[in-house]
Image: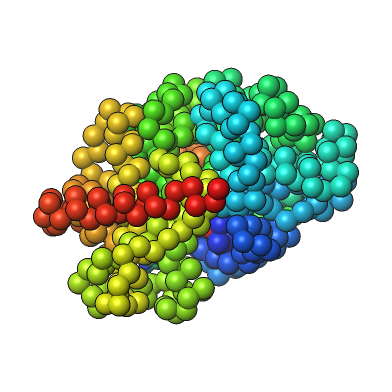
Amino acid sequence: MADYLGAIDQGTTSTRFMVFDRRGRVVARAQREHRQIHPQAGWVEHDPEEIWQCTQRVCSDALRQAQLRAADLAAVGITNQRETTLVWERRSGQPLANAIVWQDTRVSSEVSRVAAEGKADLVRYRTGLPLSTYFSSLKLRWLLDNIPGLRERAQDGEALFGTVDAFLLWRLTGGPNGGLHATDVTNASRTQLLNLETLSWDDGLLEFFGIPRAMLPQVRSSSEYYGEVAQGALQGVVIAGVLGDQQAALVGQACFRPGEAKNTYGTGCFLLMNIGGRPVASQHGLLTTVAYRFSRQPAVYALEGSVAVAGALVQWLRDKLGIIGASSEIEALARTVEDNGGVYFVPAFSGLYAPYWNSGARGLIAGLTAYANKAHLARAVLEATAFQTREVVEAMEKDSGVRLQSLRVDGGMVLNHLLMQFQADILGRPVVRPAMLETTALGAAYAAGLATGFFSDMDELRQNGAVDHTWVPQLDPAQREEKYRLWKKAVARSLDWID
Ligand SMILES: Nc1ncnc2c1ncn2[C@@H]1O[C@H](COP(=O)(O)OP(=O)(O)OP(=O)(O)O)[C@@H](O)[C@H]1O
Ligand SMILES: [Mg+2]
């Protein structure tokens, strides 16, 4: 009897495999980091083979450690970093380039060029997404323009495109030997090639971006029978759920009703609110995106505020400045001072996403005096995430007309009490952390479990969401607004740094 569900969570910095029981509790887990490849300033790549190897390793490690077999899994779900763009060869299965990661800004001059052609509104209207370096469309066009012969092979159906979910799904289901070339609607909605109303590839957009249709995966729902794993540790297990990581976290937090929202603090920070069955356009710098589609039910949409750099800035402090030895050390360092000492850090490493969508913004540290030390910098790093979240919350409330009574959070950074307290302070709202923080993997497992009848319905999932901790605002409102004002001033100076 298969009592468990598995989830592959292929993230920006690492890959996890997790096994859950019927109550959504973790019974096995393994995780491996992969390399961040920076060939030039602004470029970020991953090696697809490395991602594939990490995926296989974490699956076998987790099962072995918990003494489970593939047959103990009723189904498996896949969730993944979104927008990251891969091309590979159908016949050999070989990647034709490194994956271009969502954070990569190599197409920033293209963004301005395309905008100058006056097509930005049309693209936004059809896809729910502004022109940006963030999405797959211009990354894929860059690959087609820069890899000799790729466009011809793509037209012949010999070169395939996919986001990470599609690449893993294809490899897991057999690769060159009958692998399924498909993606789910949530991932497809991040390519900027999907029509948000019809939920199919949009011919006008394909033509506009110069993308051959023959290289695109089929678009499927997020929760349905995809196929069986052909070989390896999961051989024979049914793949029955696929969701982009942020949408998976929304599902993992059981945000199934319109107005329900969550904010995930990982590499970046992503606030998504369920808006129900209609793709309402944002007026305040948010994205409209597919939240999930379960089997043949209608799709559910979300408004999203995407922040490119959150935990990544903590890693930058660790890896590029060496001020801390591990991400978790930032809290103790930041606590050695009482406040930020006037220092503000705008981490516009990939431009600024929501609500600015300014591809030419670059990072800056403002307000430095001889008084400032590394602890003030550590504070400024943590505060940057909280300020960016407030900007997104304000946009979300204006767009949706829903006032968030409290903010539901998850992701690796929410272990940081100082940050969570500051988040409550700067929002003036309570911040609520569930007991279960691995909501991304859990959401993929939920999708797989719903498709296979492991779970009877969504109400069963709602019951798993116990609260672990709540932070309430303590900061004086006048101080809160003064800090926020200075943050905005720093942001204004970071915009359009690249001309
Ligand atoms: N105690 C901490 N304080 C601040 N930041 C932390 C802390 N612990 C982890 N982080 C940051 O959280 C991030 C990891 O969180 P999480 O594992 O949710 O990331 P992730 O987004 O799932 O990664 P990926 O993007 O690979 O999916 C890292 O960027 C790390 O620097
Ligand atoms: Mg993640």
Q: Which quadrant would residue 154 be assigned to in this image?
A: top right
Q: Position of residue 227 (x, y in %)?
A: 69, 40
Q: Position of residue 77 (x, y in %)?
A: 57, 46
Q: Is residue 268 above or below residue 205?
A: below
Q: Is residue 302 above or below residue 375?
A: above
Q: Residue at x 39, y 52 (%)?
A: 493
On screen, residue 16 versus residue 288, left or right, reads: right
Q: Nearer the viewer, residue 295 or 193?
A: 193
Q: Position of residue 14 (x, y in %)?
A: 56, 62
On screen, residue 50 versus residue 493, left or right, reads: right
On screen, residue 392 versus residue 474, left or right, reads: right
Q: Nearer the viewer, residue 328 or 464?
A: 328
Q: Is residue 134 above or below residue 192?
A: below
Note whether residue 484 is visible. Answer: yes
Q: Residue at x 68, y 21 (%)?
A: 204
Q: Position of residue 419 (x, y in %)?
A: 29, 62
Q: Residue at x 27, y 77 (%)?
A: 371
The way the protein has been coloured in the rendering is: rainbow
Numbered circles on residues, count: 0
Q: Residue at x 40, y 57 (%)?
A: 346
On screen, residue 109 versus residue 307, left or right, reads: right
